[in-house]
Image (cartoon, grey):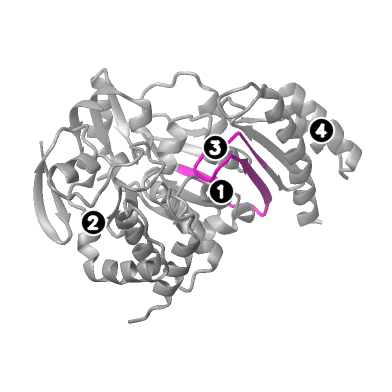
Amino acid sequence: MLVTKYLRPESLSDAYKVLTEEKKSLIIAGGAWIKLSIKKIDTLISIDNLNLNQIEITKDSLEIGSMVTLRELEINKEVNELYDGILARAIHKIMGINIRNIATIGGSIMGKFPFSDIIPALLVMDTKLIFYKQGEITLEEYLETPKMEKDILLKVIIKKEKGVGFFKKVAKTPLDFSIINIAISKCNNKFKVCLGSTPYLAKLAINTMEYLNKHSKISEEIINSAIKIMIQEIKFNKNVRSSKEYKEELAKVYLKRGLKKVIAHVG
Amino acid sequence: MLVNLIVNNQNKVFSCEPGDFLLDTLRENNYLSVRRGCDTTNCGVCTVLFDGKPVPSCSLLTVKAEGHHITTVEGIQKEAEKIGKYFGDEGADQCGYCNPSLALTVYAMKKELKNPTDEEIKEYLVGNLCRCTGYIAQERAIKKYLGDKS
């Protein structure tokens, strides 16, 4: 990889100044995927020294610094309790421990990787991002913004709620990216459903959620109708990992299993 | 540029380019037990310990390791010999190419997990591939090593 300059600023303002003033500049988080995604960059900016590697537990939320590694999250007690530990379980399925010791939550979000297992789990919870300049925006908003102004992600805030969650990653081997992944949550009697690796960037199945949330009791018939809605609203396509049809079949099966599991859990 | 690392508890200053990965820097400086495998973060054969935690050196920029402790298998010599003996006794050794990385990961696991289950052991080692042994003999050897309190 060709990097002309590497800087390690001592303050956020310095980091932001370099990021915005130098044209071909980039913040490096863990750098776990940088080798596979970037061949040449003029200025690489490290935020290692900016104290962004803490997990703070407040009364209402988990405030996760953008430089917290996936492994740190995976073994964190609070993360394991939140929504049945949906985030910890999603992280647990990402390759090996060695890569999870490098990869960070910030890098995983900012990369907007379609294969991400973390983004679906975060989307079915109440997740907000705190940026240095732009302040607070929801994760959903960030993912839907095609080209955001250059900024530094400081924190990921997940609201503490008594919800239950289901996460499934289907992959050929533990080291492979997902053929498909699905996250489902139920909190305050509201369902959230998110599909990722379709092979497009993870997306909430809004119509499916609306349909499910209209019903106070979820029967087999309602689940089958929800599956039909999900297939209509989520765009699937083939990629190197599987055909479009296979992804669709997996999504149908795991939406049904996931909903049943979530419903059974909350009684 | 110059980068200061603490390799096997020794202060070292290496000259490298900003885009160099730790695997290349270590090998250029004769840490040849750190091996190149897939070079794409998959096989784990390039694993070293970064502040005691296993990481793939093929995917960690050398400059990001500034000031940190890096441990290669030479840095855990006594434990590596112990692990090697269990591997030999159980017939878990064939070509030996993955042994240094596996020894480092098993050593880190012993420090991190208390009485791990079979499943936890397997999960900890997901990122370390061995193309010779089929893992069964390795599993026996690793369990014996983990139970060794000496």
Front position among marks 4 and 2: 2
The residues tagged by marks 1 and 3 sit, at their Cα atoms, a distance apart of 9 Å
Q: Secondary structure at mark 1?
A: helix
Using the rendered image of the protein, determine whether residue B147 is visible from the camera's viewpoint.
yes
Residue type at mark 3: give it: Ile
Residue A87, numbered label: 1
Magenta-drawn segment:
A156-183
The residues tagged by marks 4 and 1 sit, at their Cα atoms, a distance apart of 24 Å
Residue at image mark 4: A226
Residue A119, numbered label: 3
Q: Which of the pair A86/A98 is nearer the observer? A: A98
* Within-10-Å neighbours for mark 4: few <14, some 14–19, many 20+: many
The residues tagged by marks 4 and 2 sit, at their Cα atoms, a distance apart of 53 Å
Badge 4 and badge 2 both on one subunit: no
Q: Quadrant of the N terminus of chain A?
A: top left
* Within-10-Å neighbours for mark 3: few <14, some 14–19, many 20+: many
| Mark 4 / mark 1, whichever is N-terminal | 1
Residue at image mark 2: B72
